[in-house]
């Protein structure tokens, strides 16, 4: 069973993102665990893809470092197994890696069955092998930024088979029938994109956020807002606007990047991440206090 | 549910923020391009004629005909305004953006021909234009960078990755995701999410529509084969499209074999750009297609002496036609392409783009059975942009048919 509902059970959730393996396997384990200590309710772990078209420069940088550090889909699963955290985990990656994992598994099966990959007779395994392996190591759900609802049925079916969640992004431009298509397929939570563009920390919180949350008010799934949230104050604002959770990536990746650039010891960077996580979690809780008092 | 597929390829694999823009574009494509609403197609054809210089000639190539003992015809897209077939698509898309009420154009470019064509079309139609180009390509293709700027476009170098077309496409998608409400992204080839592959093919199919009529008029028959170079595949689909139903016509897509057809998994590099010949199925830049990738699905760096072919993917329709056996993919390596460049320059008085030089070079490898007795070769563009690269690349290797390259170093003897 997916543990994602637990993350949203007790007030607003703080959902941090880091690229797994940035800048290397061991330090990255420390960094992710420090987020849990700082109050993460759920962690989005990036499985790096070479062409991250939805990401801004900060996360692109993390992806490059992680790939150079040797991160692969198989290492990612080992990473999840090695992690010592007690919160739900969501794998954020691009569709080609999920799809190729299945093709590779099917080639392996064909070879074991005596078929051989050279015959070119690779079947259409779809995303099932990736989801199966992810479920084995304890991944609770997936966010795939380049997989819109129209193309997502094979992955949705695999997630259903293993009781995993499939999170979709709702953008400021998403309207009408597209919202319905997403609503039919989403589970776990919906990732509300706070503004147009790509990921990246910014100083303010867009008023597009409130409009997006309004459009989703009838949805029976938690709404977590991401893109551009960088401070406790931002986190407070989006929760006040009605979000059930705040997703923060670039502001945390920036701390990892600074650690790499300055050659800071891993413990120092981990401590900074923990402090930032605490600030963001407290911001989210402060937002709830406001909405709570308004409701009463 | 998936729309815009060619067999198992195609589709729409893009961030959610772009999906409404693709729906809007699909609607505009159907109304204006397919149904000629508001006379879009009439205006497009008129501008292609008056601004672009269409139709381009189908030239009988006398020396090549003698060399290969067949009637060889050259479809002269190098004579189109701007010097390459790219204007057909750029003009079509910029005009469509105008019909859609968009205010700004973004584009990516590899060799710079698509960027140049887009900058020209945007200036012609009065639209602001920004072109993303890999840093490495801006260095390889300085004349085109200058031409784009002369036409009023902003050229933005992209420093990520290896600084070639793949990175420029990713960067343009990021721009588009930020500005999608007012901006149209003029994709430069038959790649990307639906409806781009079909729409770009439709804009480029004027090449084969003309060629088919011209060869029938000249030779009184259909050709036995059509040969076109293939990077992303826009001139390939343009040159093939009208001939696809003619099953007696063989279609050869000539890919960049680069330095080797093997992928170096260790370094994550394919020393070629031959995704139809050596790639495997995957999802990149909005579509399911044939890609150069490692076993994990990470996209590997491609290579070609020609920056216009230097891309790890290819159009989904072309991938489908290859699977169906309708199009035969073949390869030509860097050395042969440089030879092909010099051969066409010397034998026919046409200095071709390095992309085109691949198609010319393959004529040397093809068997008489493959070519048949009547061949149409698409000259996708002219070579002015490549002169610096050719001087450099010729000096690096033993090219038997090259002129004395010392001349270019200032030693005029």
Image: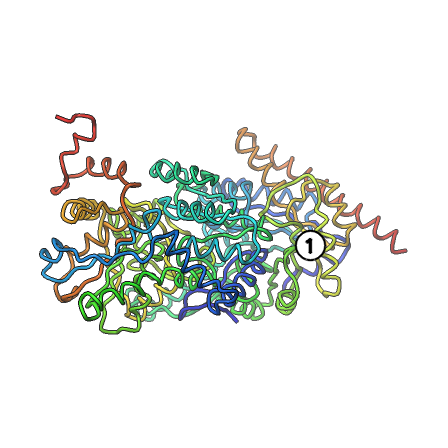
Question: What residue is shown with label 1?
Answer: A224
- Residue A105 falls left or right of residue A216: left
Where residue A235 sits: x, y (%)?
Answer: 73, 45
Q: Quadrant of the C terminus of chain B?
A: top left
The quarter holding residue A214 reads bottom right
Where residue A246 sits: x, y (%)?
Answer: 70, 50
Determine the secondary structure under disc 1: strand
The quarter holding residue B224 reads bottom left
**Colour pattern:** rainbow
Where residue A195 sits: x, y (%)?
Answer: 65, 49
Q: Is residue B161 above or below residue B280?
A: above
Packing grade of label 1 (10 A; few <14, some 14-19, many >=20) is: many
Q: Is residue B228 above or below residue B108?
A: below
**Pointer 1 chain:** A
Answer yes or no: is residue A1 visible. no
Q: Is residue B274 above or below residue A184?
A: above
Residue under the point 16% across and 65% down: B374
- Residue B69 falls left or right of residue B58: left
- Total numbered badges shown on the rendered structure: 1
The quarter holding residue A169 reads bottom right
Where residue B274 sits: x, y (%)?
Answer: 30, 54
Residue under the point 27% across and 63% down: B211
- Residue A275 falls left or right of residue A26: right
* Pick the front one: B331 or B40: B40
Residue under the point 17% across and 44% down: B342
* Pick the front one: B367 or A236: B367
* Pick the front one: A4 or A247: A247
- In the displayed image of the protein, which residue is found farthest to the right? A296
Answer yes or no: is residue A120 visible. yes
* Pick the front one: A85 or B15: B15
């Amino acid at each position: 069973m997916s543990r994602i509902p637990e993350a949203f059970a007790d007030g607003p959730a703080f959902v941090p993102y880091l690229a797994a393996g940035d800048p290397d396997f061991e330090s990255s384990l420390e960094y992710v665990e420090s987020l849990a200590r700082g109050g993460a309710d759920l962690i989005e772990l990036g499985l790096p893809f070479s062409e991250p078209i939805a990401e801004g420069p900060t996360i692109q940088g993390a992806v490059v470092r992680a790939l150079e550090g040797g991160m692969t889909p198989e290492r990612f699963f080992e990473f999840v197994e090695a992690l010592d955290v007690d919160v739900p985990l969501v794998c954020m990656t691009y569709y080609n890696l999920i799809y190729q994992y299945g093709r590779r598994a099917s080639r392996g099966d064909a070879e074991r069955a005596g078929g051989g990959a050279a015959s070119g007779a690779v079947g259409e395994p779809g995303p099932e092998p990736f989801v199966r392996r992810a479920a084995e190591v304890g991944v609770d759900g997936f966010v795939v930024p380049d997989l819109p609802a129209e193309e997502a049925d094979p992955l949705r079916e695999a997630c259903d088979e293993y009781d995993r969640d499939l999170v979709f992004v709702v953008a400021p431009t998403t309207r009408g029938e597209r919202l319905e298509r997403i609503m039919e397929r989403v589970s776990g939570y919906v990732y509300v994109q706070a503004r147009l563009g790509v990921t990246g920390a910014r100083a303010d919180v867009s008023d597009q956020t409130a409009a997006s949350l309004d459009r989703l008010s009838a949805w029976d799934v938690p709404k977590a807002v991401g893109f551009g949230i960088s401070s406790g104050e931002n986190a407070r604002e989006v929760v006040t606007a009605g979000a059930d959770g705040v997703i923060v990536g670039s502001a945390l990746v920036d701390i990892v990047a600074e650690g790499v650039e300055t050659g800071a010891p891993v413990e120092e960077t981990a401590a900074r991440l923990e402090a930032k996580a605490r600030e963001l979690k407290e911001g989210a809780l402060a937002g709830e206090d406001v909405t709570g008092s308004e409701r009463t | 549910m998936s729309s815009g597929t060619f067999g198992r390829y195609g589709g729409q694999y893009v961030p959610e923020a772009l999906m409404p823009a693709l729906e809007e574009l699909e609607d505009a494509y159907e109304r204006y391009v397919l149904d000629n609403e508001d006379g879009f197609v009439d205006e497009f054809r008129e501008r292609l004629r008056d601004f672009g210089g269409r139709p381009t000639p189908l030239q009988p190539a006398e020396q090549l005909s003698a060399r290969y003992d067949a009637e060889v015809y050259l479809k002269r897209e190098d004579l189109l305004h701007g010097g390459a077939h790219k204007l057909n698509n750029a003009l079509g898309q910029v005009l469509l953006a105008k019909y859609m009420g968009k205010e700004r154009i973004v584009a990516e470019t590899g060799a710079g021909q698509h960027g140049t064509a887009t900058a020209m079309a945007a200036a012609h139609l009065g639209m602001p234009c920004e072109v993303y180009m890999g840093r490495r390509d801006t260095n390889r293709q300085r004349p085109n960078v200058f031409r784009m700027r002369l036409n009023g476009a902003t050229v933005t170098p992209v420093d990520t990755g290896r600084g070639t077309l793949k990175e420029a496409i990713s960067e343009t998608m990021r721009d588009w995701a930020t500005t999608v409400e007012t901006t149209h992204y003029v994709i430069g080839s038959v790649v990307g999410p639906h409806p781009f592959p079909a729409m770009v093919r439709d804009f480029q199919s004027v090449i084969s529509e003309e060629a088919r009529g011209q060869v029938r008029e000249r030779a009184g028959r259909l050709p036995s084969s059509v040969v076109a170079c293939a990077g992303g595949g826009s001139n390939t689909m343009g040159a093939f499209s009208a001939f696809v139903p003619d099953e007696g016509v063989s279609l050869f897509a000539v890919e960049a074999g680069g330095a080797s057809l093997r992928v170096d998994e260790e370094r994550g590099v394919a020393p070629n750009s031959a995704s139809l010949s050596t790639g495997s199925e995957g999802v990149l830049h909005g579509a399911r297609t044939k890609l150069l990738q490692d076993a994990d699905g990470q996209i590997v760096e491609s290579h070609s002496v020609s920056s216009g072919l230097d891309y790890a993917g290819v159009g989904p329709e072309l991938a489908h036609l290859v699977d169906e056996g309708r199009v035969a993919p073949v390869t030509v390596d860097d050395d042969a392409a440089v030879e092909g460049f010099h051969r066409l320059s010397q034998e026919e008085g046409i200095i071709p783009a390095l992309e085109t030089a691949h198609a010319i070079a393959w004529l040397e490898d093809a068997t008489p059975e493959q070519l048949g007795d009547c061949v149409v070769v698409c000259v996708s563009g002219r070579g002015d942009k490549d002169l610096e690269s050719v001087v450099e690349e010729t000096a690096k290797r033993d090219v038997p048919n090259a002129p004395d390259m010392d001349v270019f170093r200032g030693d005029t003897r």
